[in-house]
Image (cartoon, grey):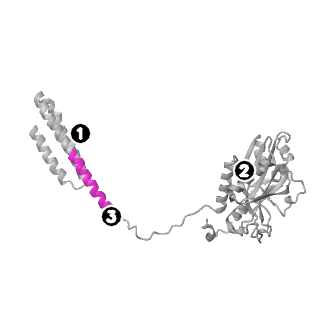
Amino acid sequence: MKEKLELILKNALDEINKAESLQSLEEVKVKYLSRKGELNSIKKNLKDLSDEDKRIVGAFANNVSNQLEEILDKKSAELYKAELNIKLNAEKIDITLPSDFRPQGKVHPLTDTINEIVEIFQGLGFSVMPSEYSPEVETEYINFDMLNFPPNHPAKDMQDTFYTKTAPNVILRSQTSGAQIRQMLNQAPPVRVISPGRVYRCESVSARKNNLFHQIEGLLVDKDITFGDLKGILNEFVRIYFGSARPTRFRASYFPFTEPSAEVDVQCIMCGGSGCRTCSNTGWLEVLGSGMVHANVLRNVGIDPEIYSGFAFGMGVERLAMLKYAINDIRLFFNNDTRFLKQF
């Protein structure tokens, strides 16, 4: 039996040396070391030997098995390396050749501006309103009446508002403030939210105006909220968005849904405050409207103005993007001119 093992070892070594591929090497391994291989066949017959022969032959069989496994592993590594080199040479790429240009899409500058503004206000503790609170097709009641617009307010005129044929008094919203009404109807104070979205107005399209544009409105309602809180939030927003060196000013204004009301200006980015055509030689450009939420608006949504107060603000995304990037024509955002868009 020992002679058989020596013969098996000799034949196995010859076949291993002749193997030229991993597949043929695997066939040798199966032939000699598998459960049905020649070595195992001999090991099964050890039970017929005497104890002394069983000890000697068993040890020799294990030694043969270990030798074959070691040699097979070494041969397998050599064949794997050789086959890998052949494959790499066949698939070799000349990295010195010029590559093909594949243009990649980028985030639109308006989307990028909205994302930046939202991120700033989220850092200031505001959350984004649910989308179901902010539909673009709105009722006149939510868009105007609940926001303290008088019945004869000029903003309701067909010259300023798009009325649909869906039903009487159904419009394309002219502001995102309606989302604030729904938020207060569905959430008791404290409320601290922003609402980005598209709005529509009957405007003559020009370098500074469009009949579709984007707004972001904010609302904060809680106990003991003051105009100082409003100034602090908006000054911090301007500081982060435009940089700490950009001066701001608050001007008294009027909005039906806030009292007192104010508009916020930043120093003109085109002329640095010295006066130019863009800022009508004032050195300032309006960026947003704001004010303390009118008591009538709070009553309309069931909030007691004797207990709670709040502020609201609204800003045009296009205006902010134009000021930050020194863009002088709002229509560039909507023309899909890749020469303009690829700059962002």
Image quadrant in which the N terminus is located: top left
Please give the residue where the numbered disc 1 appears in the rendered image.
35
The CA span between labels 2 and 3 is: 58 Å
Asked if residue 267 is positioned above or below residue 137 in the image, the reply reads below
Q: Where is residue 336 in the image (x, y as percent from the top left)?
A: 65, 68
Please give the residue where the numbered disc 3 appears in the rendered image.
90
Of the two numbered discs 3 and 1 in the rendering, the one whose residue sits closer to the viewer: 3
Q: Quadrant of residue 270?
A: bottom right
Label 1: element kind: loop
Label 2: element kind: strand
Of the two numbered discs 2 and 1 in the rendering, the one whose residue sits closer to the viewer: 2
Q: Earlier in the sequence, mark 2 or mark 1?
A: 1
Q: Quadrant of residue 339?
A: bottom right
Please name whichever residue, 115 or 17, is drawn nearer the observer in this view of the structure.
115
Q: Quadrant of residue 268?
A: bottom right
Of the two numbered discs 2 and 3 in the rendering, the one whose residue sits closer to the viewer: 2
Please give the residue where the numbered disc 2 appears in the rendered image.
194
Q: What stretch is highlighted in magenta?
A: 70-87
